[in-house]
Image (tube, grey):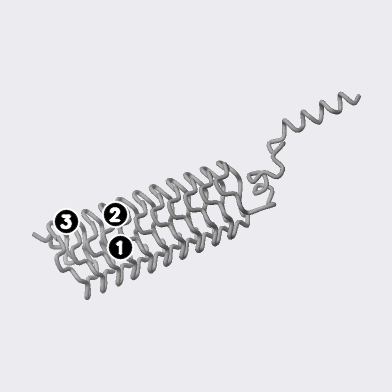
Amino acid sequence: MTRGLAGLALGLMLASPTAGLAGEPAADILAGRTKDCAKCALAGANFKRFDLSGADLAGADLAGANLHRANLAGANLAGANLTGANLNKADLKRANLANARLGEAMLFEADLSAADLTRADLAGAMMGSSHLTFAELNAANLADADLADAQMHGAKLQGADLSRSDLSQTTLRRAELEDAHLEATNLLRADLRGVNLKDADLRDADLMHADLTGANLSGANLRGSRLLLAKLTDAKLDGADLVGTVMPDGTTHP
């Protein structure tokens, strides 16, 4: 009988996914005993609606993890792998995501206000209606990302790659986009009032109906772009390349 009970206990331990993990960081964070798990292997983990505010998850592998509506405000996710993760409606205000990998991640309606995404890889990320007000995105990769209707007032995007991304109806008032790459980017009806696009690459970009009032486009490359019905009141175009550009009145610049 004793041997039988011992064998049953051993079988239950082996069958349990957290068997033998008590006290280990990965098990502790999944059980809610801690918020800190730097460099932990958490790929595919379910953190839906978890309170991870202020957590230390630097360098953690969270690829494919479910963080839907999770509270990650002020969390340290620097260098973390969040490729393909579900961060829809997550609270990431003031989070540190510098150098993080977020390719193909879902960030619909996520709040990234004042978050640090410097040099983060967000290629192909789905970020429609997200909040990136005053976020740091310098040198970030946002190529092919969906940022339609996003709020990016005052965001810093110097040298960022936004080529082929969807920024239609996005608010970028007074955002910093100097030297940014916006080739073939969709900026239809975007709010670009007071934006700094100095020396930016906007070749073949669609700026139809965009509001560029007071924008700085000095030295920008606008070859082949479409400015049809766009507002350019008080915009600076000194040294801008407008060859083949469709102007607001429908004429094509020579």
Q: Secondary structure at mark 2?
A: loop
Is there CB contact under 8 Å for labels 3 and 1?
no
User: Where does the image place residue 207, in percent across and percent down from the top left?
Assistant: 26, 61
Which of the 4 quarters of the picture holds residue 222?
bottom left
**Is residue 42 depicted above or below 112 in this figure?**
above
Q: CA distance from mark 3 to mark 1?
A: 17 Å
User: Where does the image place residue 124, in percent across and percent down from the top left?
Assistant: 39, 47
Which of the 4 quarters of the picture holds residue 174?
bottom left
Is there CB contact under 8 Å for labels 2 and 3?
no
Which of the 4 quarters of the picture holds residue 225?
bottom left
**Is residue 46 depicted above or below 156 in this figure?**
above
Residue 223 is tagged as 3
Q: Amino acid at mark 1?
A: Leu
User: Where does the image place residue 11, in percent across and percent down from the top left?
Assistant: 77, 28
Q: CA distance from mark 2 to mark 3?
A: 13 Å
Q: Secondary structure at mark 3?
A: loop
Mark 2 or 3, nearer chain start: 2
- Quadrant including the C terminus: bottom left
Residue at label 2?
Answer: 185
In the displayed structure, does residue 11 sit left or right of residue 5? left
Residue 177 is tagged as 1
- Quadrant including the N terminus: top right
**Is residue 237 depicted above or below 106 in this figure?**
below
Q: Secondary structure at mark 1?
A: loop
Q: Amino acid at mark 3?
A: Arg
In the displayed structure, does residue 57 sit left or right of residue 133? right
Q: Amino acid at mark 2?
A: Thr
Q: Residue at x 32, y 65 (%)?
A: 176
Q: Residue at x 39, y 68 (%)?
A: 153
